[in-house]
């Protein structure tokens, strides 16, 4: 036995590999070279639509997404109720975005709101509730069907424009890529690509708070002593256990709505990995504190987290300094520009950390529009943006940033980009009537058509 154990010991330390092992070289960064017509940065609400549109138009498309799935606000951040696609009884945003929403609704066995019934001051009645994970899968497959090359976990580090093309360097998990492209569409939400490319950005000193989407349960709201709960809540705020602004000072609202978009995290910023890390930590920390507080209260002892999104959603960071900046007056008056390429319909929706949000609805019959110039950074070539980082003032941006509006922008930006490639020019130089007619060809709706 001792002899056999010795033999086994020698075998264990022998230099040869045991059966099934494969010798591997030490870890190193792999380099990749990619050539593509259109590079879309950001696979969120606007970016997915832009990528699909460019692919369906017959161009090669590469889509960079630093996270693990597509959908952005709708999927990863959990705001799975996009809107608004109809205004005053008429559809004003359609095309690829609407196609994706309809398919997700049908496949989940859901139903659309009755858009013929006016929403009045309750605009959320016209938002479409989606199954977020299902939506993410559907849009990923639509990208693949359109020939889009998706690159998850990857972000740009350098962008240089040379003659008629861009040279872009990216880093990802174990990858360093060099991408040569003809046009860039920045759908990052933070104008990240525009910053890397060297264009000027705009930002307010104060930004809107972020929100971690979650759902809680385990209690019967109808049986709760709400006055007692409010008294205990005020005590917890006074002793520093809780922060009033984190749930908008509305503990009853938290319980009544079981979570659902009530949290506010001040200075939530997704611009860098460090700032985004802090936003996520603070969102989850706030939820945990409130959970522990609730579980001490009679009737809430079994309160639990039923669902929580993977990251804190961010409403506002950077915007481009564009050829035109959409103002609050432009938005609320429904100004139609000569180069309007899409509509936007949503209340002015500025979230204030201390007081929550009081939407200011548009007056009867008013629908805002988005000019092409607001999607193009000053002094840029072969570069366009779509989504909340468009050129606009803070109040206008608080309405323009919502999903349906971003979908319309994404399709318009992609059309401008592919037509620019075909003509060998920059998006700002493409005849606006050609952009509008092409958007309509792919099912979109354009102002003045």
Image (cartoon, rainbow, N blue to C red):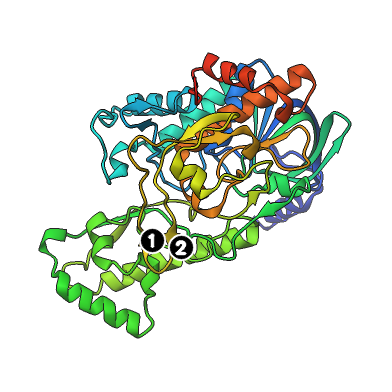
**Nearer the camera: disc 2 or disc 1:** 1
Please tell me which of labels 2 and 1 falls first in the chain.
Answer: 1
Left or right of 231 in this view: 201:
right
Nearer-the-camera pick, 99 or 122? 122
Please name the residue that numbered disc 2 is placed on.
283
Q: Residues within 10 Å of mark 2 (few under 14, many from 20)?
A: many
Residue shown at the point (42%, 52%) measured from the top left: 349
Q: Quadrant of residue 338?
A: top right
User: Real-space Cα distance between discs 2 and 1?
Assistant: 8 Å
Nearer-the-camera pick, 131 or 392? 392
User: Residue 181 location, x and y as percent?
Assistant: 78, 29
Q: What is the tally of numbered marks visible in this picture?
A: 2
User: Residue 447 location, x and y as percent?
Assistant: 50, 26
User: Residue 232 location, x and y as percent?
Assistant: 24, 78
> For the view shown, which residue lies furthest in the bottom direction?
239
Q: Quadrant of residue 178?
A: top right
User: Residue 132 location, x and y as percent?
Assistant: 41, 39
Residue 174 visible in the displayed image: no
Please name the residue that numbered disc 1 is placed on.
263
Residue shown at the point (52%, 25%) measured from the top left: 141
């Amino acid at each position: 036995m001792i002899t056999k154990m010795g033999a086994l010991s020698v075998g264990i330390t022998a230099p040869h590999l045991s059966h099934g092992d494969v010798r591997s070289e030490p870890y190193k960064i792999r380099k990749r070279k990619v050539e593509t017509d259109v590079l879309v940065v950001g696979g969120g609400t606007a970016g997915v639509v832009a990528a699909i549109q460019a692919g369906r138009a017959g161009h090669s498309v590469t889509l960079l997404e630093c996270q693990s799935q597509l959908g952005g606000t709708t999927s990863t951040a959990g705001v799975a109720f996009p809107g608004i696609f109809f205004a005053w009884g008429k559809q004003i945003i359609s095309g690829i975005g609407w196609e994706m929403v309809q398919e997700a609704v049908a496949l989940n066995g859901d139903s659309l709101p009755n858009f013929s019934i006016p929403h009045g001051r309750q605009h959320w009645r016209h938002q479409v509730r989606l199954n977020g994970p299902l939506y993410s899968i559907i849009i990923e497959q639509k990208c693949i069907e359109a020939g889009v090359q998706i690159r998850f976990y990857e972000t740009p580090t350098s962008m240089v424009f040379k003659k008629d093309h861009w040279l872009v360097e990216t880093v990802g998990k174990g990858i360093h890529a060099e991408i040569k492209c003809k046009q860039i569409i920045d759908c990052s939400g933070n104008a990240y690509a525009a910053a890397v490319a060297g264009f000027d950005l705009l930002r307010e000193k104060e930004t809107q708070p972020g929100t971690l989407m979650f759902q809680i349960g385990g209690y019967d709201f109808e049986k709760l002593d709400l006055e007692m709960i409010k008294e205990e809540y005020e005590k917890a705020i006074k002793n520093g256990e809780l922060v009033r602004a984190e749930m908008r000072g509305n503990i009853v609202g938290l319980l009544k709505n079981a979570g659902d978009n009530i949290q506010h995290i001040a200075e939530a910023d997704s611009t860098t990995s460090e700032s985004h890390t802090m936003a996520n930590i603070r969102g989850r920390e706030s939820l945990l504190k409130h959970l522990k507080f609730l579980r001490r209260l009679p009737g809430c002892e079994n309160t639990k987290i039923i669902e929580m999104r993977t990251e804190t959603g961010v409403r506002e960071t950077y915007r481009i300094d564009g050829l035109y900046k959409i103002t609050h007056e432009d938005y609320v008056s429904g100004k139609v520009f000569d180069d309007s390429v899409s509509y936007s319909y949503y209340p002015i929706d500025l979230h204030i950390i201390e007081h929550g949000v009081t939407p200011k609805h548009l007056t009867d019959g008013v629908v805002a529009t988005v000019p092409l110039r607001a999607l193009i950074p000053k002094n840029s070539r072969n570069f366009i943006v779509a989504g909340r980082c468009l050129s606009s003032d803070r109040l206008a941006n608080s309405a323009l940033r919502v999903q349906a509006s971003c979908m319309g922008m994404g399709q318009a930006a992609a059309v401008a980009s592919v037509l620019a490639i075909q003509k060998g020019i920059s998006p700002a130089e493409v005849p606006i009537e050609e952009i509008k007619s092409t958007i309509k060809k792919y099912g979109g709706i354009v102002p003045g058509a």
